[in-house]
Image (cartoon, grey):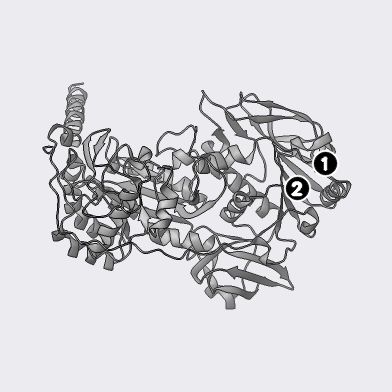
């Protein structure tokens, strides 16, 4: 008993000391006065050329291609879903264009009920009757209920009372093998989306809401099946990723709620179930199963001093990291100015060794999300934002100034490339995509996976609260961070368990570490975490920087491919906007003959593909 009593005393003492040391910058903050580092060099950020878009119709449709029909003018979101899933697809506004496909996805519009023509109705009924697989989004709103017999439903009831989505047993749920993936939160308790409860006819439920009313159904018609989604793609994916008004049941990192990935993995599961010998684009390169990114935010003076120590540890475990630098050339209430020339040669050498430096703004302000855009002519040394207190800033800080000036000073310090951005406090400014594009950034990491409920990269919209006009900027959400007790080192087991879930789905696991939490660094806890965590990873993990991962996804997003199998040969045709090394495909029930095994790594097909259209032929069993 005495042992536990003393142990509890020690734990309390440890917590008290932790709080005091972590917040010592509040209690012992530098005197308020703008001590300014003069003479820093500034190099203007130049515009860059972004990759053009690619069109799903650039290659002809065939039986292994998912035909995607939409009534909407802007189809970027459908493209985003099928590109992330990695399935070959052909997107059209004309149903008859999809003739020859074995799987068709229908995307209607709840706000504009579709009246199908007789030809369109007959096409769909015949398609399923002959053995096709039909997936319907918003088909409940078709005029006159002309698809009731095909989808096997009698009606539906709209509601805003459903908060959960529960998956039932189905062969299409290949990627949903954890409790979290079988029971999703659709919303918070206070706010729920519109859902449609399907009233079944001949169909059967494969997913329900918490009241056991049908959310997704399947109907066997002739030789084929028709799958009916009672919840829209907007609430399954778009709302959390693109509208920036998440209203999600977020728990701020370290949990596992991949709601926004459901439709991606569902479609992929259907495809691999229905196309027995299938090929899909994978999410990591060089045959790896999943991706791991280590990032550090440099917020304080001792953070800068600690960089070499972390670089040494990361070299020892065989990884490179992204260091997001707060370019602090002004002393304020948070800390003294620390962006000093004495550090620059070290930073240059670290970058030469393969590590990345990104911008983490200049002023670590909790007001970043409400900062005005500014003129985008802000420059050093005239731009002097100053933090007075937690939510009070002076010196006219702007979003442009924070993004532009920080990059120009990093370039002036001799850092060759600054294309990654992370805002202080992980805040999103409405002008962010536009400004990032203007100043040559490419990748961002401002959200936690619990904000957007996704473990895959996606692209920002240029307009706030808009589902149109996609930007070129990729967001790579955070998964694990170090800003709460206990230190990361004491959470290695939980971190590995979370990694396993994301690894199984081929996701991207992004870690955020701050090399400045004084108590934690006294014992090098975070460095011990890095060594312990990385030593227990499987061998087929792509360990990369934010820039490397973003560059791969940017190119992967423009790949269109088709394939077919005939006479024991796999014929693969690929169209790409750029050269890509290590491009990876998953093979399902396809075995290459020994002479082609050189293209296999970790049981995946790995190719170096060239810009333009290329053709590949592989002998298979």
- Quarter-of-image position of residue 260: top right
Whether residue 395 sits left or right of residue 587 in the image: it is left
| Residue at x 44%, y 51% (from the top left corner) | 434
User: Which one is in front, 493 or 230?
Assistant: 230
Question: Around disc 1, counting alpha carbons within 10 Å, would you say few (fewer than 14), some (14 to 19), or many (20 or more)?
Answer: many
User: Which one is in front, 158 or 53?
Assistant: 53
Return the x and y of residue 64 as percentages of the image width and height.
71, 61
Whether residue 616 sits left or right of residue 259 in the image: it is right
Q: Is residue 319 above or below residue 203?
A: below
Return the x and y of residue 165 as percentages of the image width and height.
60, 32
Q: Secondary structure at mark 2?
A: strand
Q: What mark, if any, has residue 150 been given in the picture?
A: 1
Q: Residue under circle 2?
A: 134
Return the x and y of residue 181 as percentages of the image width and height.
55, 39
| Residue at x 27%, y 68% (from the top left corner) | 352
Return the x and y of residue 586 as percentages of the image width and height.
58, 61
User: Which one is in front, 149 or 32?
Assistant: 32
Q: What mark, if any, has residue 34 been given in the picture?
A: none
Count of numbered badges drawn on the protein:
2
Q: Are marks 2 and 1 in contact (CB under 8 Å)?
A: yes
Quadrant where the image shows the C terminus: bottom right
**Residue 404 can be seen, yes or no:** yes
């Amino acid at each position: 008993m005495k042992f536990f009593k003393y142990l509890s005393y020690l734990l309390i003492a440890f917590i008290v000391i932790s709080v005091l040391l972590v917040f010592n910058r509040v209690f012992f903050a530098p005197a308020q006065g703008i001590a300014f580092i003069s003479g820093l060099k500034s190099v203007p950020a130049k515009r860059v050329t972004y990759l053009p878009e690619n069109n799903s119709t650039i290659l002809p449709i065939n039986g292994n291609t998912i035909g995607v029909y939409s009534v909407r003018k802007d189809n970027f979101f459908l493209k985003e879903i099928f590109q992330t899933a990695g399935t070959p697809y052909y997107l059209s506004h004309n149903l008859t264009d999809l003739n020859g496909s074995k799987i068709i996805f229908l995307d209607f519009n709840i706000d504009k009920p579709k009246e199908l023509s007789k030809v369109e109705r007959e096409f769909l009924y015949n398609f399923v009757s002959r053995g096709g697989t039909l997936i319907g989004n918003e088909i409940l709103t078709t005029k006159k209920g002309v698809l009731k017999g095909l989808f096997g439903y009698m009606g539906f009831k709209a509601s805003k009372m459903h908060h959960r989505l529960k998956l039932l047993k189905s062969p299409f749920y290949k990627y949903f093998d954890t409790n979290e993936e079988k029971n999703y939160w659709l919303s918070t308790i206070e706010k729920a989306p519109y859902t449609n409860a399907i009233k079944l006819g001949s169909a059967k439920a494969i997913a329900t809401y918490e009241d056991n009313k049908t959310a997704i159904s399947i109907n066997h018609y002739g030789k084929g099946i028709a799958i009916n989604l009672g919840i829209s793609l907007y609430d399954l994916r778009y709302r959390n990723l693109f509208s920036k008004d998440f209203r999600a049941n977020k728990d701020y990192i370290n949990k596992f709620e991949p709601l926004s990935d459901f439709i991606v993995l569902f479609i992929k599961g259907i495809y691999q179930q229905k196309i027995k010998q299938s090929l899909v684009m994978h999410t990591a390169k060089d045959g790896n199963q999943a991706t791991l990114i280590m990032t550090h935010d440099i917020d304080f003076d001792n953070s800068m001093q600690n960089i070499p120590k972390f670089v040494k540890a990361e070299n020892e475990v065989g990884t490179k990291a992204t260091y997001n630098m707060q370019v602090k050339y002004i002393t304020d209430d948070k800390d003294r100015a620390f962006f000093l020339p004495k550090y620059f040669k070290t930073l240059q050498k670290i970058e030469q060794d393969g590590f990345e430096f990104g911008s983490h703004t200049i002023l670590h302000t909790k007001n970043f999300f409400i900062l005005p855009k500014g003129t985008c002519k802000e420059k050093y040394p005239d731009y002097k934002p100053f933090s007075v207190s937690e939510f009070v800033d002076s010196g006219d800080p702007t979003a442009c100034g924070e993004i532009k000036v920080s990059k120009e000073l990093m370039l002036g310090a001799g850092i060759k490339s600054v294309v990654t951005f992370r805002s202080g406090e992980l805040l999103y400014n409405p002008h962010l995509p536009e400004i990032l594009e203007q100043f040559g950034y490419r990748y961002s990491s401002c959200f936690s996976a619990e904000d957007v409920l996704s473990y895959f990269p996606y692209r920002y919209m240029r307009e706030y609260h808009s589902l149109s006009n996609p930007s070129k900027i990729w967001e790579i959400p955070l998964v694990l961070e170090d800003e709460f007790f206990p230190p990361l080192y004491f959470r290695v087991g939980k971190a590995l368990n979370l990694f396993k879930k994301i690894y199984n789905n081929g996701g991207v696991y992004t870690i955020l570490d701050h090399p400045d939490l004084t108590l934690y660094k006294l014992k090098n806890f975070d460095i011990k975490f890095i060594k312990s965590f990385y030593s227990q990873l499987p061998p087929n993990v792509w360990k990369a920087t934010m820039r490397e991962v973003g560059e791969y996804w940017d190119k992967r997003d423009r790949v269109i491919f088709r394939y077919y199998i005939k006479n024991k040969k796999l014929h693969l045709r690929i169209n790409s906007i750029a050269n890509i090394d290590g491009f990876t495909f998953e093979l399902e029930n396809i075995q290459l003959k020994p002479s082609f095994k050189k293209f296999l790594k970790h049981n995946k097909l790995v190719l170096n593909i060239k810009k333009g259209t290329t053709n590949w032929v592989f002998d298979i069993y």
